[in-house]
Image (cartoon, rainbow, N blue to C red):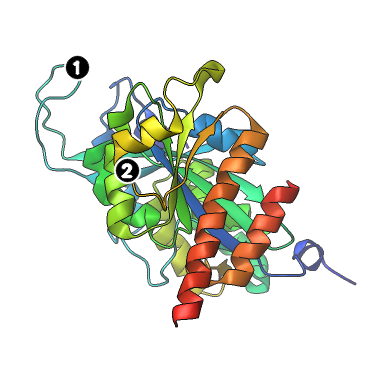
Amino acid sequence: MAELDGQHATNGSQPPEAALVRSYIMSSGRATGSVPLDIESMLQLTWKGARGLAGLQFERASIASLCKDEILSVAELSARLRLPIGVIRVIASDLIVDGFLEAYLPSFGMADDVDLISRLIEGVRAL
Amino acid sequence: MPSELQKRTPARSPVPVKIVVAGGFGVGKTTFVGAISDITPLTTEAAMTVAAEGIDNRGHVSSKTTTTVAMDFGRVAVDSSIVLYLFGTPGQERFGFMWNDLVKGALGAVVLVDSRRIEDSFPALDYFEHRNLAFVVAVNTFDSIVFHSSAEVREALAIGSHVPVVATDARDRESVKATLLSLLEVTLEQAKARVVRA
């Protein structure tokens, strides 16, 4: 992963532009995926994904492997793999379309969901 | 025979919920997130394109057209299905366009204020007011010193009485819980009001 560390270099030893180009080559130049994933959308490996894991390569393999034992958000995958959020979005969205990952999206209309907010209040109080 | 996959699949599907923690640089956003997070706050970077403009803080004329913005975030398992994600926003005004992405779908926001540098919170306040997102103002009491009262802060920020202004200690778990609860109470009241109107 040495070549990916460049985008975290802050001492100017390596131009961040170089890493950025590399990142978007991984997602074939696309900035958005076909499945609308938010940064907090959570991902889990499916049965098909578990069976096909060995055949995946590069970033597809890294993302799928991390979602094998834990259900992780787009943001967590980005942090752990040190890849920009946009890249995770695109690759994860491809994996969902291929049936390798399942996504748990934030509930639509959450701000109007009295039951969900009440549960949140109860849960945070009990923390 | 249950597989590993079945065993670790929770009984209920996870429901991610996002709350945004905004405020000026160094106000304690990451400390606030870390005080309640189940995990050590993680940092993620979003790459973005910005128009080359101005002079950067090292005095060089900036010719960069791309930059990365770091966000710290944490995760709290609230109950058997709700997973709360707390995202610390990059505070700088010029990253405002990134907030759209970050704030989309958020339940609400906590605006952390250092009462010695109140103006640092203006971009966040403007943004959330504009977006009609529920928020609370939390004055971080560094070393338990309250530099200004909540009433003074409220007046200085010119915010309406419907927005709670609370004192918080970003290092203290109970204090952070109380701040989140004040935000959740606001979101609950607003949700109930909308249900009644509908």
What's the chain of the residue with tag 1?
B
Identify which amino acid the numbered label 1 is placed on.
Arg
Q: Is residue A39 above or below residue B26?
A: below
The foreground one among B147 and B128 is B147
Residue at image location 46% in from the left, 55% down from the top: B108
The foreground one among A26 and B31 is B31
Label placed on residue B58: 1
Q: Secondary structure at mark 2?
A: helix
Q: Is residue A64 above or below residue B32?
A: below
**Is A107 on the left or on the right of B39, as rendered?**
left
**Crowdedness near tag 2: few (<14), some (14–19) or many (≥20) residues, C-alpha within 10 Å:** many
Residue at image location 60% in from the left, 63% down from the top: A117
- In x, y percent, where is residue B77? 68, 52
Q: Quadrant of residue B157?
A: top left
Residue B71 in sight in this render: yes
Q: Nearer the viewer, mark 1 or mark 2?
A: 2
Residue at image location 25% in from the left, 50% down from the top: B97
Please report contact status of discs 1 and 2: CB closer than 8 Å, yes or no: no
- In x, y percent, where is residue B134? 43, 56
**Is A23 on the left or on the right of B197, as rendered?**
left
- In x, y percent, where is residue A91? 43, 61
- In x, y percent, where is residue B82? 65, 60
**Is B121 on the left or on the right of B191, as rendered?**
left
**Is B96 on the left or on the right of A100, as rendered?**
left
Label placed on residue B124: 2
Residue at image location 9% in from the left, 35% down from the top: B53
CA gap, disc 1 and disc 2:
25 Å
